[in-house]
């Protein structure tokens, strides 16, 4: 087997780990970029130039910023308070950890699936409780704000996963 194929596979595994991080609500685009960076270094910039690396790094920064802006716009559009963004992130991370621990009984696949479910349900619950109890909003407004947070998180996740898919295509 050609050693460059092994390097491509290992770099792709790193980019897929970045995609998993994105699903869990973490900035995985930079982890995915690290896979591209390692591949470029090992291949001595044969397929990916230093300028392309710089451009993709800047692109990762723009994508992360766009994700946050998209989430903020949707949170405001659905009537959530500014503190809801922080609560959505905290609830998402906490939900992913709890979901992963519960799903761990079913092995890796169960842990990954329950982490994803936990991340979204944790975000929803945290924002709902924040709006309902901290801002004394009625059920309908609190659930609308929580729903907007989840929609923003989903859209941001799809944008990031599309970017990571493109980064994987650079390796292959």
Image (spheres, helix red, strand yellow):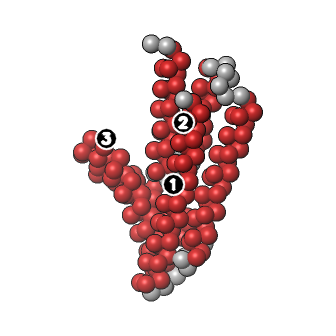
Q: Residue 168: horizontal and vertical position, in percent? A: 54, 36
Q: Residues within 10 Å of mark 2 (few under 14, many from 20)?
A: many
Q: CA distance from mark 3 to mark 1?
A: 23 Å
Which quadrant of the figure has residue 92?
bottom left
- Earlier residue among tags 1 and 2: 1
- 43 to 76, vertically: above or below: above
Q: Residue 91: horizontal and vertical position, in percent? A: 45, 62
Residue depth check, mark 3 versus mark 1: number of the one nearer the observer:
1
Marking on residue 168:
2
Q: Residue 142: horizontal and vertical position, in percent? A: 46, 79
Q: CA distance from mark 2 to mark 3?
A: 23 Å
Report if the CB atoms under discs 2 and 3 are less than 8 Å apart. no
Could you say which is closer to the camera, residue 161 or residue 92? 161
Q: Residues within 10 Å of mark 1 (few under 14, many from 20)?
A: some
Q: What residue is rendered at 29% in x and 51% in y?
A: 102
Q: Quadrant of the C terminus?
A: top right
Which element carries disc 1, helix, strand or loop? helix
Q: Quadrant of the N terminus?
A: top left
- Earlier residue among tags 2 and 3: 3
Q: What residue is rendered at 64% in x and 63% in y?
A: 69
Question: Which residue is labeled 3 in the image?
Answer: 108
Question: Which residue is labeled 1 in the image?
Answer: 158
Which element carries disc 2, helix, strand or loop? helix
Q: What residue is rendered at 33% in x and 50% in y?
A: 113
Report if the CB atoms under discs 1 and 2 are less than 8 Å apart. no
Which quadrant of the figure has residue 119?
bottom left
- Earlier residue among tags 3 and 1: 3
Q: Is residue 101 visible?
A: no
Q: Residue 61: horizontal and vertical position, in percent? A: 67, 48
Q: CA distance from mark 1 to mark 2?
A: 15 Å
Which element carries disc 3, helix, strand or loop? helix
Q: Residues within 10 Å of mark 3 (few under 14, many from 20)?
A: few
């Amino acid at each position: 087997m050609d050693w460059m194929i092994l390097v491509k596979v290992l770099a792709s595994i790193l980019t897929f780990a970045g995609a998993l991080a994105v699903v869990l609500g973490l900035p995985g685009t930079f982890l995915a970029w690290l896979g591209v960076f390692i591949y470029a270094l090992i291949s001595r910039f044969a397929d990916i130039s230093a300028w392309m690396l710089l451009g993709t790094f800047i692109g990762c920064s723009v994508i992360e910023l766009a994700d946050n802006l998209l989430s903020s716009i949707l949170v405001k559009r659905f009537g959530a308070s500014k503190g809801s963004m922080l609560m959505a992130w905290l609830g998402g991370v906490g939900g992913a950890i709890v979901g992963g621990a519960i799903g761990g009984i079913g092995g890796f696949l169960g842990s990954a699936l329950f982490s994803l479910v936990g991340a979204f349900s944790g975000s929803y619950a945290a924002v709902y409780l924040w709006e309902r109890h901290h801002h004394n909003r009625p059920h309908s407004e609190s659930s609308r704000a929580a729903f907007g947070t989840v929609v923003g998180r989903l859209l941001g996740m799809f944008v990031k996963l599309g970017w990571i898919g493109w980064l994987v295509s650079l390796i292959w």
